[in-house]
Image (tube, rainbow, N blue to C red):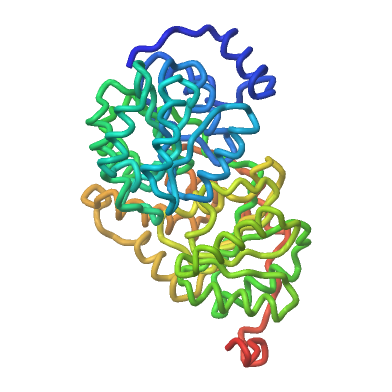
Amino acid sequence: MSSPHFSKMHLRKMLHDRFGLASFRGMQEAVITRILEGHDVLALMPTGAGKSLCYQLPSLLLPGVTVVISPLIALIRDQVRRLNTLNIASLAVIGSEDMNAALNRSKHLLKLGQIKLILTSPERIQIPSFLQWLSQSLPPEGLSLLVIDEAHCISEWGRAFRPAYTALGAVRDRYPNTSVLAMTASADQLTRRDILQVMRMTEDSIIRSSFNRPELFYRVAHSAAPWRTAIAYLQSYPLTSPAIFYCKMRQETEKLAALLSFYGFHAHAYHAGMDASKRFEIEQWFLKAESGVMVATIAFGMGIDKPNVRLVAHVGADHSVASYYQETGRAGRDGNQSDVLLVLSNREYFNIVQVDETDADPSIHDLEWQSSAHFGAFIRTPQCRRISLLAGLDEVFSGSCHSCDFCCPTYRPLPLMRENTSEWVPKSVD
């Protein structure tokens, strides 16, 4: 969809007058300019880079309506709440409320152009009655921009894979003249390929900024008792703000939360198998908490805007740099120094390393193998961890970062412990 031209002065005035900001950050202005010129954009921007502004500001300048596809109901509610505080009229189409009744109440406002953003889930937007309502209710200018938030969910290689995302290409086909903005904070080569293919986009639509997060201190360890290692580190850590501990399995989150509670920490487990109302209650606790530990699977965290998380720890991990980077990105969103800890069991560590050390010709391996190999290089690197971490995201980093356990081994080292855990694990939670 062709769009009118807006000068840099106009954009910066809008930034100041409507959002109260003095200047754009990073690649924000470049992304917004491309959108207003009517181009598709795949924006690769790290967590905390201000991705939401990249569609909120254009929505006020484009003639029609911006539709935002987001994976989490809690995230959609939070975004609508923030938009309302900015006096940007928006509509959330979510939850169990009768959809037709909710949409009919908003139809008149849409035709008058009083609603600029509609936020919904990938499952909802594919319902035929919703698409029909959208076509009938939009003003003459129609749909100006289709936004795919957390676009890495499109890729089956990503741990956050959401099947409904792969069907969004059909929505694009229904509105072929509408620009698409796909956004993610982590996308390796395989994930980028999937996003471009599903959303009918081309390589020249990619705008990327550096994925380097200099405020994060990366530390990796392997242990015969990984939970004990992680808890011992937490006991030595000045926990003055909330922390997140990620586990691979739902039962592990509950057991580790119980262990942390036994040792005096305020800890909550969180996973997709919990009742929705309970998950919402824990989410709200975390957003308001000044300390404590969220012990979760990756069901928690996507889109959570908690600026002062100072520690993100993994006890076990998926073998993907992109997924690991996405999850660790929840630390230090305010730009202040924060810590990232990965603790693997000895068995998991050596299984990952074996992939990295294979003697086979790398040229015959597919992208999935390469992603696992990058993760193996990250955990066993004999040099700055940022070199291998960013290499997994197709970014070159050289030198010493002075912010990882290789470059700065004396910074908050892991406590030395006996491997015998028989007296460490309480029988009540064993």
Residue nearest the viewer, comparing 262 with 229: 262
Q: Is residue 296 left or right of residue 167?
A: right
What residue is shown at x 55% (from left), y 39% (from top)? 79
Quadrant assignment, res 150: top left
What residue is shown at x 69% (from left), y 75% (from top)? 416
Q: Is residue 321 visible?
A: no
Can you say whether 38 is above or below 99 in the image?
above
What residue is shown at x 45% (from left), y 30% (from top)? 208
Q: Position of residue 231 (x, y in %)?
A: 66, 73
Residue nearest the viewer, comparing 239 with 217: 239
Q: Position of residue 127 (x, y in %)?
A: 28, 44
Say which quadrant the N terminus sits in.
top left
Q: Position of residue 290 (x, y in %)?
A: 75, 56
Q: Position of residue 359 (x, y in %)?
A: 29, 60
Can you say whether 99 is above or below 159 in the image?
above
Q: Is residue 207 left or right of residue 245?
A: left
